[in-house]
Each structure stands twice: as C-alpha cells, then as structure tokens.
Image (cartoon, helix red, strand yellow):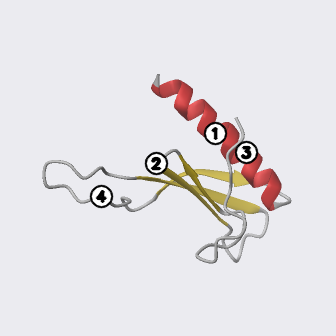
C-alpha cells in the first residue's frame, strides 16, 4: 500500500503528514534529542452526526520506529504498520 504523504502543503513539514481516506490522518514526528527515532501518531476524524462536530480527534502515538536513518524509511515503516493495523481490524 502506498500512502500519499503531503509534500507541498504549507501547513505541515514535507512528508510528515498523510490522510488515508477521509477519516484517518497519520503524523510522523522526529523528537529533537533522538535523531534516529520517529514516532507515528494516528488521528481519527469524527463525522458530523447526532450533534457531534466534524473534526480530528487528538492524535495518539501508536508506534515508535528506532534506528530510522531517514524520513523515507520512517514513511515505509509507517505504511507497513498501517497495513498491519488495518488488516487486524478486519
């Protein structure tokens, strides 16, 4: 599965955010003191029904990728994690 990461959206650092469909957003972050570690956060969008507003729920950290040498490697590992997570759901 190839996830389209935002590369030119001025709201995000290039390659760190991806929307999967309408309801799921993946966010990669690299903590300052740990240059070879990337964290994956998952945010789920609620739908506007029964008085619930349409917005993204606060992201939760779902994975930490250690010994990642580049953003591209972190993206690949995030895509693999998401594919496994999606398969576990269904």
Marks 2 and 4 sit apart, C-alpha to C-alpha, by 11 Å
Disc number lying in front (2 or 3): 2
The earlier-in-sequence mark between 2 and 1 is 2
Side of 43 where 27 appears, left or right? right
Q: Residue under circle 3?
A: 77
Characterize the local packing of mark 1: few (<14), some (14-19) or many (20 or more) Cα atoms within 10 angstroms: some
Crowding at label 2, few (<14), some or many (≥20) Cα neighbours within 10 Å?
few
Pair 4/3: label in front: 4
How far is the residue under mark 2 from the one under mark 3? Answer: 22 Å
Disc 2 target residue: 22
What percent of the width, then of the height, locates residue 24? 48, 48
Which quarter of the picture shows residue 53?
bottom left
Closer-to-camera residue (84/7): 7
**Residue matched to label 1:** 81
Would residue 55 be found to the left or right of residue 28 on screen? left
Residue located 43% across and 47% down the image: 23
Residue drawn at (81%, 52%) of the image:
73
Residue where numbered disc 4 is placed:
54
Counting from the top left corner in percent of width and height, residue 22 is at 46, 48
Is residue 12 shown left or right of residue 37? left
What secondary structure is found at the residue carrying circle 2? loop
Q: CA distance from mark 2 to mark 1?
A: 19 Å
Asked if disc 2 and disc 1 are in contact, CB closer than 8 Å, the reply is no
Q: x, y (%) of residue 71?
A: 79, 60
Circle 1/circle 3 CB separation < 8 Å: yes
Mark 1 and mark 3: Cα distance apart in space: 6 Å
């Amino acid at each position: 599965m190839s996830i389209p990461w935002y590369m030119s959206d001025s709201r995000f650092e290039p390659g760190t955010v991806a929307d999967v469909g309408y309801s799921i957003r993946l966010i990669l972050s690299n903590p300052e003191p740990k240059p070879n570690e990337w964290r994956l956060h998952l945010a789920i969008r609620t739908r506007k029904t029964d008085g619930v507003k349409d917005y993204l729920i606060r992201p939760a950290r779902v994975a930490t990728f250690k010994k990642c040498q580049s953003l591209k490697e972190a993206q690949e590992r995030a895509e693999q994690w998401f594919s496994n997570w999606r398969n576990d759901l269904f």
